[in-house]
Image (cartoon, helix red, strand yellow):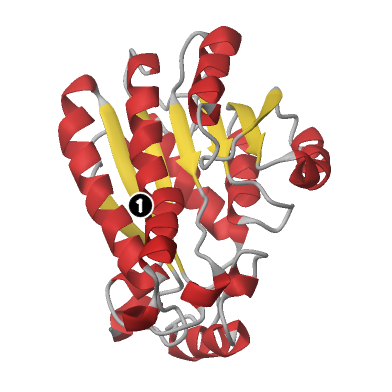
Amino acid sequence: MIISASPLVDLRGKRGLVVGIANESSIAAGCAKAFRQCGARIAATYLNEKSKDWVLPVADRLDVEWTAPCDVREPGQLEALFEEVRTQWGGLDFLLHSIAFAPKEDLHGRVVDCSAEGFAVAMDVSCHSFIRMAKLAEPLMTDGGTLLCVTFYGSERVVEHYNLMGPVKAALESATRYIAAELGPKGIRAHAISPGPIATRAASGISRFDELLERAAAQAPQGETVDVEDVGALAAFLVSNAAKRITGTVIPVDGGQHVHG
């Protein structure tokens, strides 16, 4: 029997854009670390000049090749980012979208009380931006590629205090399936990764998040919550050739918490 010397999850030569690193404990940072450990070349974004001071040290430790600003609410900035991808690399093999936002007054209230403006902002940043990125990535993925986004099980059932983000993440998951169907003929795959609760800076915006973590640990068959390294391991597999026949999925990485419904 002949065994190939190449590891199953081998990302050497692949170029990936990571959108959403906030600090070293963020999900995007955990995924970027896994991508690099598997040999991928990485570029990363920062929201604005203020966040740049937090992101660049993480990017340096991960040996990120280049960074660029990306505030999807700023007209033209997303297009400029993908033009930079074209200039720097000439193409793209995978993308991680790990950004979400809702105005605090809408996020902390009941869904039925959210404002039209707040709902629109949450949908634009957390969902429609992934669709926009897919469209911009499409011409750069001439040999196929993978598009990843990050969701949460509050999309499928009511999670106390998750509020407005539940419907928004449900829309994101549906968009992922449609993207997979539409871009599949070009060899472009799409997935939504659904981690269990993780104590990130983004999660701190959710009211009483500590209680959510405690419930997750109690419900998980493995008795533990997950961390960003667990998410990164799944992300690295999904963008590798080992997952080339998998697309259009919502994949939980939550220690089995989802089995309790």
Location of mark 1 (residue): 192
Looking at the rendered structure, the secondary structure element under dot 1 is strand
Q: Viewed as shown, does residue 210 lie left or right of 193? A: right
Q: Taking 244 as reference, is 116 above or below it?
A: below
Q: Which amino acid does label 1 sit on?
A: Ala
Question: What residue do we see at 35% from left, 32% from top?
Answer: 134
Q: Viewed as shown, does residue 55 lie left or right of 218? A: right
Q: Say which of 260 and 116 sits in front.
A: 116
Q: Taking 99 as reference, is 178 above or below it?
A: above
Q: Say which of 209 and 189 sits in front.
A: 209
Percent coordinates x, y for residue 195 in the rendering: 46, 64
Q: Viewed as shown, does residue 158 lie left or right of 82? A: left
Percent coordinates x, y for residue 25 in the rendering: 70, 58
Q: Say which of 242 and 195 sits in front.
A: 195
Question: What residue do we see at 75% from left, 36% from top?
Answer: 59
Image quadrant assignment for residue 132 = top left
Q: Say which of 213 and 106 sits in front.
A: 106
Image quadrant assignment for residue 130 = top left
Percent coordinates x, y for residue 39 in the rendering: 60, 28
Question: What residue do we see at 80% from left, 47% from top?
Answer: 54
Quadrant where the C terminus sits is bottom left
Q: Answer whether residue 1 is visible to the viewer in this image.
A: no
- Pointer 1 local density, CA inside 10 Å: few below 14, some 14–19, many at least 20: many
Quadrant where the N terminus sits is top left
Percent coordinates x, y for residue 87 in the rendering: 57, 8
Q: Taking 217 as reference, is 91 above or below it?
A: above
